[in-house]
Image: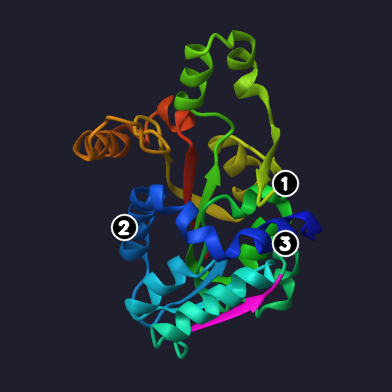
Amino acid sequence: MCDGAVSAAYDAIAREYDRHLEDDAWMRRILWGRYGQVFRPGHHVLDVGCGTGTDALFLARRGVRVSAIDVSAAMVAQARAKVAGHGLADMVQVAVLDIGELASLPAAGFDGVISSFAALNTLPTLTQFAADAARLLRPQGRLIVHLLNRSSLWEWAGLVAHGRWAEARRLGGRRERVFAVGGHPVRHYLPRANEAYVRYFSPYFRLCRAFGLGITRPPHPIRHVPEAALAALGLLDVLIGQRHPFIDWGHFVVLEMERGG
């Protein structure tokens, strides 16, 4: 079950959440590129930790039915308003549901499961989520998870630039970190890409691809760096993101997996 601090934190920022993620629009476009390749009109996708429904709306516009869940009632209210405003209420159903309650959903009811922007990082372990996702997916269904990485090249470089050498050395070894969300401390759990797949997902899923995001492109715009340069760094991200060791250098990591038959 989700810590009540998580729902309280995201309730607090629900109205401003989309604005907070404006700088990450480039990253979301890459995720959407994968969703567009994998999911087809008529598919049914479960969006876990849907936030304000941005990914659900993208899929619905492409003819994909979406069941979207989030533990934050305020986030769900924002998502429902957006869905209604876009006239897509027949394509997207949004509900308040804890990730730990996925067992209440019908088995083999989905062609895909997605979870983006660190929704799963608030879980101390992904063991139950992996088992639930496997039960919910039809054979050959796809699971795409977008996880906050344990550390990133940009964060390490920032610490080094400010002479914080001891922190830079410890950065990659911290499996848990607390981040402030809406003024609330929220503990995040940070597995590496290969560790997450082997430990949690490999009993049920075949790994199709894994790639880092935010390796060469900074997670947020930098003053005096033109957008064209940032876009070029984003393209470099895509070119090297699936290669080791770069996959572990990004701000986020994406695991795309297929349910066994």
Check if mark 1's residue and mark 2's residue have beta carbons within 8 Å. no
Give the image location of residue 22, x and y in percent: 40, 53
Q: What is the number of the mark on residue 33?
A: 2
Q: Where is residue 26 in the image (x, y as percent from the top left)?
A: 33, 49
Residue at 54%, 8% (x, y): give it: 163
The picture quadrant where one finds residue 106 is bottom right
Q: Which amino acid does label 2 sit on?
A: Gly
**Quarter of the rendering containing residue 54:** bottom left
- Does residue 159 show up magenta in the picture? no
Residue 249 in percent (x, y) is at 46, 28
Between 19 and 89, the one lying in front of the other is 19
Among the two numbered marks 3 and 1 on one chain, the one whose residue lies closer to the N terminus: 3
Q: How crowded is mark 3: few (under 14 residues within 10 Å), some or many (20 or more)?
A: some
**249 lies above or below 10:** above
Q: Which of marks 2 and 3 is in front?
A: 3
Asked if residue 203 can be seen in this view, the reply is no
Estimate the x, y position of residue 125 in percent, counting from the top left: 73, 47
Q: Quadrant of the N terminus?
A: bottom right
Q: How is the image coloured?
A: rainbow
Could you tell me which residue is drawn at 59 percent across and 32 percent down? 150
Q: Which of marks 1 and 2 is nearer the N terminus?
A: 2
As helix, strand or loop, the secondary structure at mark 1 comes to strand
Per the image, the residue denoted by label 1 is: 186
Q: Which secondary structure class fits the magenta region best?
A: strand
Identity of the amino acid at label 1? Val
- Mark 3 or mark 2, which is nearer the start of the sequence? 3
Q: Residue at x 39, y 88 (%)?
A: 87
State if disc 3 and disc 2 touch (CB < 8 Å). no
Give, as a single range, the part of the protein colored magenta.
92-97
Judging by the rendered image, the residue that carries numbered circle 3 is 7
